[in-house]
Amino acid sequence: MSGRFDGRVVLITGGSGAIAAAAGRAFVAEGATVVLAGRDSAKLAAAAERMGDGGPAVDWVAADVTDSAQVAHLVAEVVRRHGGLHVAFNSAGVFTPPAPLADLTEANWARTVDVNLTGVFLAMKHEIAHMRANGGGVIVNMASNIGAHGRRPGMAAYAATKAAVSALTRTAARDHIDDGVRINAISPGASDTPMSYRPGESKADRDARIRTTVPAARVSRPAEVASAILWLASDDSTYVVGHDLVIDGGTTA
């Protein structure tokens, strides 16, 4: 345990997801107080219990990142309970059923934009407002290797929103580095999470497919993605501003 995050409060949106869980465990192991956020209280409570695993308690706050008032309350509640907000990992996102663009429903388009893009905008808006008034902070946003770095058929909505998150991150980083708020993004490829499976696919099927499409010949482990998140959030990367770090085993190299 290096204690890189001793005394720091970390907020993770999309807190019940697999990568969020890996990041949360890593932050806790390095001394942080972690607060998970998401819409489903039961899932958050279960994720927080697993993440703590008998060690320091992990807190949670229910909030919908598409609702500005709820996000404002979330940030205020984190500060009220724990005295500050130093790091945010904005990982909330959705992946609606793939479809060619002409067959993409307007409802699925709107849902994807609301969560994946507007949710990141609102999270940053309220996180930055607190951080710049209280000595600064660090934000890491979840983009994807599908978007600015690569495209796939049937994934127009997801790719468009994740490419926008990359651009939004870079622009916000330029806007707020003078305020002491350092902002970057990660763009993972396929990781060992439920999203890495196609419908009806077994683990053996997935692994065989990945061996032919990913130069590293495997999916990433969530802990590997978490290591990159912690590096970007730590003082080890203080000169890294507005970067979108691709973690995809060479898929989009």
Image: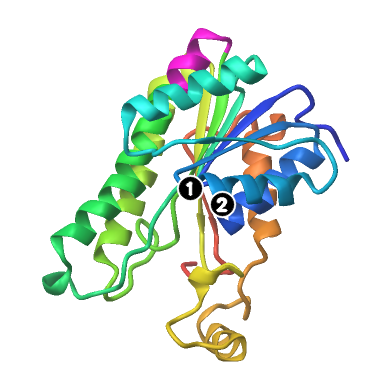
Q: Image point 33% across, 68% down: which residue? A: 151
Q: Which residue is mark 1?
A: 40
Circle 2 packing at 10 Å, graded few (<14), some (14-19), many (20+), is some
Residue 21 locus on image (x, y percent): 64, 51
Residue 62 locus on image (x, y percent): 49, 37
Q: Is residue 127 shown above or below 15?
A: above
Position of the N terminus by quadrant:
top right
Question: Is residue 58 found left or right of 165 in the rendered image?
Answer: right
Q: CA distance from mark 1 to mark 2?
A: 5 Å
Q: Secondary structure at mark 1?
A: loop
Nearest the eye: 170 or 65: 65
Question: Is residue 163 found left or right of 215 in the rendered image?
Answer: left
Nearest the eye: 183 or 45: 45
The reply to whether residue 11 is visible in this rendering is yes
Say which mark, if any, is on residue 43: 2
**Label 1–label 2 contact, CB within 8 A:** yes
Q: Secondary structure at mark 2?
A: helix
- The range drawn in magenta is 127-135
Q: Is residue 148 magenta?
A: no
The secondary structure that most of the magenta stretch takes on is helix
Say which mark, if any, is on residue 22: none
